[in-house]
């Protein structure tokens, strides 16, 4: 039968002295095991899952991102601006305003979802 792998724990000199004093004549490893593995040892909660409402909001943002080509369109607009070849007509202005409104909604929704 193979022996289990050792567990290492770093302690300050003061922490070790405190443990040794509490252990008394008991070997330090045995004392630590008895305290940690006892029924009275503190139990810690598992990580909380985000609330369902937050998951719904995040899913909604991801769905909206998947339905749009804003990132690509804004990149093309920036490229045209940098080249000096951008002509802004009513249609392009409406597209830019719609993209800005969608981005503002996504930002607000993400902030709301992440606050909780």
Image: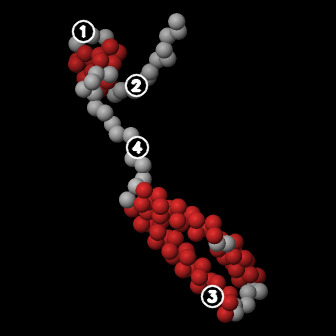
Residue occupied by mark 4: 47
Instruction: In the rendered structure, find residue 9 and report the number of the disc placed on it.
Output: 2
Label 2 to label 4: alpha-carbon separation: 23 Å
Residue 86 place in picture, x, y as percent: 73, 87
Decide: few, some or many residues near mark 3? Use Cα within 10 Å; few <14, some 14-19, many ≥20: few
Q: Is residue 70 above or below residue 24?
A: below
- Proximity of marks 4 and 1: CB atoms separated by less than 8 Å: no
Among the two numbered marks 4 and 3 on one chain, the one whose residue lies closer to the N terminus: 4
- Proximity of marks 2 and 4: CB atoms separated by less than 8 Å: no
Label 1 to label 2: alpha-carbon separation: 20 Å
Q: Residue at (72%, 76%) from the top-left corner?
A: 76
Q: Quadrant of residue 75?
A: bottom right
Identify the secondary structure beneath mark 3.
helix
Residue 51 place in picture, x, y as percent: 40, 55
- Foreground tag (1 vs 3): 3
Identify the secondary structure beneath mark 1.
loop
- Foreground tag (3 vs 2): 3
User: On the picture, is 49 further left or further right than 43?
Assistant: right
Label 3 to label 2: alpha-carbon separation: 62 Å
Among the two numbered marks 2 and 4 on one chain, the one whose residue lies closer to the N terminus: 2
- Residue farthest to the top? 1
Q: Residue at (35%, 15%) from the top-left corner?
A: 29
Among the two numbered marks 1 and 3 on one chain, the one whose residue lies closer to the N terminus: 1
Q: Nearer the viewer, residue 83 or 17?
A: 83
Residue occupied by mark 3: 94
Residue occupied by mark 1: 25
Label 4 to label 3: alpha-carbon separation: 45 Å
């Amino acid at each position: 039968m193979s022996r289990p792998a050792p567990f290492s724990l770093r302690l300050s000199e003061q922490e070790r002295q405190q443990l040794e004093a509490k252990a008394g004549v008991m070997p330090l490893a045995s004392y630590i095991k008895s305290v940690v593995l006892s029924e009275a040892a503190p139990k810690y909660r598992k990580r909380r899952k985000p609330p369902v409402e937050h998951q719904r909001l995040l899913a909604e943002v991801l769905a909206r991102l998947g339905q749009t080509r804003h990132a690509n369109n804004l990149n093309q607009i920036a490229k045209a601006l940098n080249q000096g070849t951008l002509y802004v007509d009513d249609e392009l202005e409406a597209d830019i305003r719609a993209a800005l409104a969608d981005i503002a909604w996504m930002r607000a929704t993400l902030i709301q979802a992440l606050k909780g």
